[in-house]
Image (cartoon, grey):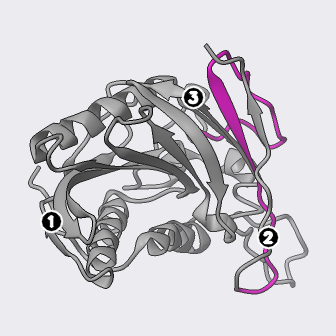
């Protein structure tokens, strides 16, 4: 498959791509009288009511630090990783809801994120040389589509090599961004480092959601990039009622408790609720 060039739009619009598809194509309506119009179930607070993401505190030599929960619930949570004092590199991993996307819609979402990175570099007054996005497949999640790309950029602090990976996994976007001083690693080495990080992350990552997604049959979604779980439901949707996955040693849990918003617009920020297993 040929790589795709950077497209248009920004990070948050990748989220909106998922919301649009879920809202238009796969809403679930409750039983009601035939003379009353059915109200579609909202994506967040309906199709997805709660989610649990359990991620490793250490992977491929990187150690997790602080979490940041974005004000808009659709933008999810980011986790910063570091390799220790004096070790070059900045790594951030993002988890945010995607829903069910067709292959074309996911490609558009990845292109939007890629273009958002280019726009951010231009907005900072720096320069960036953007490569192509290429397909990425996790050995642990072979059915989950993904893209990875590398870029080099300069700003007032110096020259850097960077890479971005985006995976559509169990109804969520899993995105990672790595930047390293250009003197410490080549562009190719930076891309390969991020690939190894994603492989290590996906080998241990748990994503479990509950809500009206439990009533969606993957066979009713022609052409979508949804993967059926072993029980015949959407992969990543594990029931109608909330459940708590096991949080093992060296793992940390993020809880998402979504609520349907009555009107468009940003909601008040909520503090993240995390449960952490014992560190190794």
Helix, strand or loop for disc 3: loop
Farthest-out residue, front: 86
Q: Which residue is mark 3?
A: 57
Task: Give the CA distance from mark 3 to mark 1.
Answer: 30 Å
Residue sitting nearer the eye, 155 or 30: 155
Give the mark nearer the N terminus: 2 vs 3. 3
Left or right: residue 186 versus residue 12 is left
State the residue position of label 1: 130
Q: Nearer the viewer, residue 71 or 109?
A: 71
The mark closer to the camera, 2 or 1, is 1
SS for callout 2: loop
Seen at 11% across and 49% down, the residue is 1
Residue situated furthest right in the rendering: 33
- How many residues crowd around disc 3 within 10 Å: few (fewer than 14), some, or many (20 or more)? many
Where does residue 55 sit, x and y in percent of width and height?
58, 32
Residue 279 position by quadrant: top right
Whether residue 21 appears in magenta in the rendering, the answer is no
Magenta-highlighted residues: 235-264
Sequence order check: which comes first, mark 2 or mark 1? 1
Quadrant of residue 96 within the rendered picture: bottom right
Q: Is residue 83 visible?
A: yes
Which residue sits at x=75%, y=38%? 239
Q: From where the camera sits, is residue 133 visible?
A: no
Taking the magenta stretch, the answer to whether it contains residue 261 is: yes
Give the CA separation, mark 2 to mark 3. 31 Å
- Contact (CB < 8 A) between labels 2 and 3? no
Give the position of the C terminus as an image quadrant: top right
Q: In this figure, which residue is indicated by the disc labeled 2? A: 260
């Amino acid at each position: 498959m040929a790589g795709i060039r950077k497209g248009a739009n920004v990070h948050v619009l990748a989220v909106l791509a998922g919301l649009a598809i879920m809202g238009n194509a796969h809403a679930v309506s409750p039983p009601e009288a035939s003379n009353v119009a059915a109200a579609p179930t909202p994506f967040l607070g309906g199709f997805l009511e709660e989610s649990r993401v359990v991620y490793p505190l250490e992977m491929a030599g990187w150690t997790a630090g602080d979490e940041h929960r974005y004000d808009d619930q659709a933008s999810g949570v980011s986790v910063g990783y570091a390799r220790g004092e004096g070790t070059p590199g900045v790594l951030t991993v993002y988890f945010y809801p995607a829903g069910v996307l067709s292959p074309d819609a996911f490609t558009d979402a990845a292109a939007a994120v890629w273009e958002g990175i280019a726009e951010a570099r231009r907005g900072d007054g720096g320069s960036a040389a953007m490569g192509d996005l290429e397909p990425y497949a996790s050995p642990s999640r072979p059915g989950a589509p993904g893209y990875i790309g590398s870029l080099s950029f300069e700003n007032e602090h110096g020259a850097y090599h960077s890479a971005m990976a985006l995976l559509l996994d169990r109804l969520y976007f899993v995105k990672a961004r790595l930047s390293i001083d250009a003197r410490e690693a080549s562009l190719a080495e930076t891309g390969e480092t991020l690939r190894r990080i994603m492989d290590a992350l996906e080998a241990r990552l748990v994503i479990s959601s509950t809500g009206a997604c439990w009533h969606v049959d993957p066979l009713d979604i022609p052409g979508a990039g949804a993967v059926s779980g072993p029980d015949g439901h959407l992969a990543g949707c594990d029931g109608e009622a909330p459940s708590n996955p096991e949080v093992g040693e060296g793992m940390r849990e993020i809880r998402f408790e979504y609520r349907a918003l009555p009107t468009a617009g940003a909601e008040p920020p909520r503090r993240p609720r995390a449960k952490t297993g014992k560190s190794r």
